[in-house]
Amino acid sequence: MKQWFLGVLLAAGLLACNNQDAGGGGNADSSKGARAEQLMADTANYTTVQWLDSTTQDLGKVMDGAKLDVVWRFRNTGGKPLVIEKASPSCGCTVAETPKEPIAPGQEGRIRATFDSKGRTGTQHKSILVMANTKPMKAHELVFNIEVLKQ
């Protein structure tokens, strides 16, 4: 009976190890993503952010077809790591890039957007909705205005 019981325990232990390995337990990217999800889900992990640049930027005039980079700098002013969950541009003509890693308390980061003006003549008002583990609100709107001139 003891041998049977030990055999069952051994088999259960091996199965548990195999299931853990199959779940990507050793993958660094999986653990980073899980950590970011945890920080976003738990309000005890929320922090504060200070936008170092105005959240609205007026960029003047460009010729149709120009590509323009826009940058917003920020600082984590709280006591927990700042996680930028996502940055969603208002249209397909703008692509946003966010920090991949959490920003430590006191550190600075930036969000960069690239705007493609091709075929978008006239005054353009574009926005990026940023979601982060910040209080008192998670959503931040970054805006830029530009006038695209015909060639």
Image (cartoon, rainbow, N blue to C red):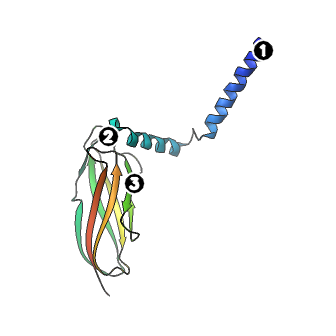
Instruction: Specify few, some or many for label 1: CA neighbours under 10 Å numbering under 14, 14-19, or 20 or more.
Output: few
Q: With 98 as the anchor, is 17 left or right in this view?
A: right
Look at the picture and state if 136 lies above or below 146: above
What amino acid type should be assigned to the residue bearing mark 1? Gln
Q: Is residue 2 above or below residue 44?
A: above
User: How many other residues sit within 10 Å of disc 2, few (<14), some (14-19) or many (≥20)?
Assistant: many
Reading the image, the residue beneath label 3 is: 86
The amino acid type of the residue labelled 2 equals Tyr
Name the residue nearer the viewer: 48 or 137.
Answer: 137
**Quadrant (top left, top right, bottom left, bottom right) of the N terminus:** top right
At x 64%, y 35%, the residue is 19
Label 1 to label 2, Cα distance in Å?
A: 52 Å
User: Which label was assigned to residue 3?
Assistant: 1
* Residues under numbered marks 1 and 2 in contact, where contact means CB atoms less than 8 Å apart: no
Left or right of residue 25, residue 130 in this image = left
Quadrant of the rendered image containing residue 93: bottom left
Residue 87, image x and y in percent?
Answer: 37, 57
In front here: 73 or 136? 136
Image location (x, y in percent) of residue 31? 50, 41
Q: Earlier in the sequence, mark 2 or mark 3?
A: 2
Instruction: For marks 2 and 3, give the CA distance.
Output: 15 Å
The label on residue 125 is none
Query: What residue do we see at 38% from left, 79% from top?
Result: 118
* Mark 1 or mark 3, earlier in chain: 1
Q: Residue furthest top?
A: 2
Q: Please tell me which of labels 1 and 2 falls first in the chain.
A: 1
The residue pinned by badge 2 equals 46
Q: Could you say whether the residue bearing mark 1 is in a helix, strand or loop? A: helix
Q: Quadrant for residue 54, please give it.
A: bottom left
- Using the image, determine if residue 15 lies above or below residue 66: above
